[in-house]
Image (spheres, rainbow, N blue to C red):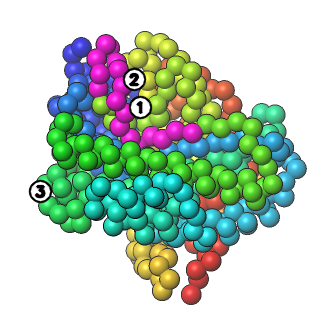
Amino acid sequence: MEKKIKIFGQLDQDAYKQIQMCVEKGEYGVLCADHHIGYSMPIGGVVAYKDYISPSGVGFDIACGNKAVMTNLKAEDIEIKKIMDEIVKQIGFGLGRPNPKPIEHPVLEKIAKSDLNYIRKMYPLAQEQLGTVGSGNHYVDLFKDEEGRLWIGVHFGSRGFGHKIAMGFLALARNMKFDDKPKDANNMMAPPTLLKVDSELGQDYIYAMKLAGEYAYAGRNAVVEKVLEILGAKPLFEVHNHHNFAWKEKHFGETFWVIRKGCTPAFPNQLSFIGSTMADDSVIVEGVDSKEARESLFSTVHGAGRIISRIKAAGRIKWKKGKKGQHYPVRLSGGLINFKEVQKMMAERGIELRGGGADESPECYKKLDEVLNYHKDSIRILHRLKPIGVAMAGEDVYDPYKD
């Protein structure tokens, strides 16, 4: 198989330059239709390596992913305002936010007993953040489907635990200490960081990445269980997978380490939950077997795809740390988006919004249907989920740690 790059959607030139750099040592690249520039490797990008694993490719939010659950309730049967209030009261949202009620899970014991000292040292952080959602485009949403059934949808990853692993291995790859910060960690066009799969460092990274994956799954499961408890509901069906990860897979008769950054695996019959903007329909999709699907390395979008940067949308924000460990935003300059108008629009659509900000307004993203249409030959839509409640980090989120 000759090296080549499969492109879906309208090409972003900076993202294309990044995927080209990554494929120099890889065998195959893909840009899904929601692609845009990321750190070192584009978000919405896929690269297949024979001999390498890439910490910069997997990225800083290792195992970020989505989980959706269909409940036994009808959307019309719940008091949506009351439920959303309870969600933001009982679940931690925000940068560095600890869990209001710390939980236990077997993955924490794995972290505590890891053979790697720098993993063991992260146990307190991992323990306090397990079951929290974080900031940015991470959320807990409630939806109704075509038949009025109530769904829960969540999107987040391995929190500070995964971020420290990513940063640590970027440092180790540069012969620095695990706790050092590489100078090019903020350079979006930095060349890919590659580790030989058969090296000790490569094997250590694969182990740490998989542990972060278990941690992310445990966190999403815990949050969904908490929402089910708040609702007094039972789960009838679930979809769960992540989109910032590396998998050992077979394609075109050969075995590769496939890095997906902001890409959802979509093998034939595999189900995925793909989130949209806070105001638009999300979907449950199923992968199919086709020429397009095989050329995409059975990968599809993980969302609508950002078109306006956070700074342009919201202006410049500086995060400060409060007395009890929470972070809160201080605005330094204005942006393009009037968030009060966004809140008004959400209310007019009957969507209960908790938190959020201008940087997550629908105008910041492409339309999900337009993006999905580029992948119409490799996936099929099974359910459309209309948002009725959205909870994200933001100034309007209930703060149980308020000074």
Residue 266 is marked as none
Report the residue at 22% width, 43% height from top: 202
Disc 3: which residue: 175
Disc 2: which residue: 296
The residue at the far left in this view is: 175
Report the residue at 26% width, 35% height from top: 19
- The amino acid marked with disc number 2 is Ser
Image coordinates of residue 125 in percent, x first then y, are: 42, 68
- The amino acid marked with disc number 1 is Cys
Image coordinates of residue 281 in percent, x first then y, are: 65, 40
Task: Please tell me which of labels 3 and 2 falls first in the chain.
Answer: 3
Quadrant that contains the N terminus: top left
Q: Nearer the viewer, residue 161 or 305?
A: 161
Q: Main secondary structure of the magenta part?
A: strand
Q: Is residue 308 above or below residue 381?
A: below
Disc 1: which residue: 32
Left or right side of 115 for 281: right
Report the residue at 46% width, 47% height from top: 214
